[in-house]
Amino acid sequence: MSRIAYVNGRYQPHGSATVHIEDRGYQLADGVYEVVAIVGGKMVDEDPHLDRLDRSLSELRIKPPMARAALKLVMREVIRRNGVRDGLIYMQMTRGVAPRDHKFPKQAETAVVIYARRRPIAAQIAQARRGVKAITVPDIRWDRCDIKSIALLPNCLMKQRAAEAGAYEAWQVAADGTVTEGSSTNAWIVTKAGELVTRPLSDAILSGITRLTLLKIAREQGLKLVERPFTVAEALAAREAFVTSATSFVMPCIEIDGKPIGNGGVGLLCTALLDHYLAYIEREGEPVDAVPALRADAGTAQAAE
Ligand SMILES: Cc1ncc(COP(=O)(O)O)c(C=O)c1O
């Protein structure tokens, strides 16, 4: 099956799909994105991701290109055309095409790219059962990490450092010694006292949708939950550590900066949380082939061939 991408109102062959050279996303990283996981033909937390997309657009004063119901139709069409049962859908929206100028253009249409990619989850689950390594790096990003901006250069640099160190993720550390988040994940620890700890929401981290869902699961399970910053020293002394994201789910970190966490293996709580998360997806995921509820405002999708 050949891959198809949605680009500014048209479904195009993925390999030849292009955007304009003066797209402000391309030139200025003036845009936002979302990644939604697809597992067993279901989208995971579709509406919370779309809520965050709306917020990111609004924080940057980029006009939403279409109503949510229309966007949901396009997302499903992209997933259907690409035959994705396990994988992800990537959506990017930029301020559009205009002569290069740092100021916002007076007239520009929000540019949209949506594509879906297959990604078998079995290998990822196997990796989670084994656990991964992490390193710590300075957090060199800006003050609005709550916006899911496409400006990801610091994150790329840190992920590359992790890869070169044979690690899965780079935990970013603020000037005060506390862990903010991973380069593309939220960071968590389980203390020796059995408390599940993750940093509270602020401009310093992205409000991960997986983080929100896991907080809900942890509350339902009656776990001792504390949203507070924690230091690298606390992480190294923790019983368990892990990261979460739409594509990592719950990924146990069994080593940080070359030092084993807990007994150096995947912990009981990480395992239980991953199992609960997978059960949640199975139970609550939005079937891709279900038609989304259409509202009167759905007519604004540009869906020409
Ligand atoms: C910096 C950062 N933090 C956290 C996350 C996790 O967010 P989510 O769970 O919504 O994937 C991501 C995901 O891309 C990210 O880039």
Image: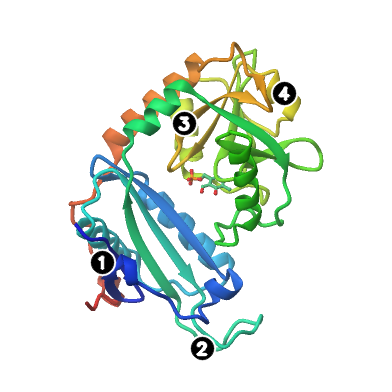
Residue for badge 1: 295
Residue for badge 4: 234
Q: How many marks?
A: 4
Question: Helix or strand or loop: what does disc 2 sit on?
Answer: loop
Residue for badge 2: 107
Q: In this orientation, which residue lies closer to the viewer: 32 or 291?
A: 32
Identify residue type, mark 3.
Val
Label 2 Cα neighbours within 10 Å, binned few <14 / some 14-19 / many ≥20: few
Give the number of the mark in front: 4 or 1: 4
Give the number of the mark in front: 1 or 2: 2
Label 1 Cα neighbours within 10 Å, binned few <14 / some 14-19 / many ≥20: few
Residue for badge 3: 250
Residue at the spot 42% in from the left edge and 50% down from the top edge: 48
Label 4 Cα neighbours within 10 Å, binned few <14 / some 14-19 / many ≥20: some
Q: Give residue 37's position: percent from left, percent from top.
A: 36, 46
Nearest to N terminus: mark 1 or mark 3: 3
Camera sees residue 220: no
Nearest to N terminus: mark 1 or mark 2: 2
Residue at the spot 59% in from the left edge and 35% down from the top edge: 187
Q: Give residue 279's position: percent from left, percent from top.
A: 32, 28
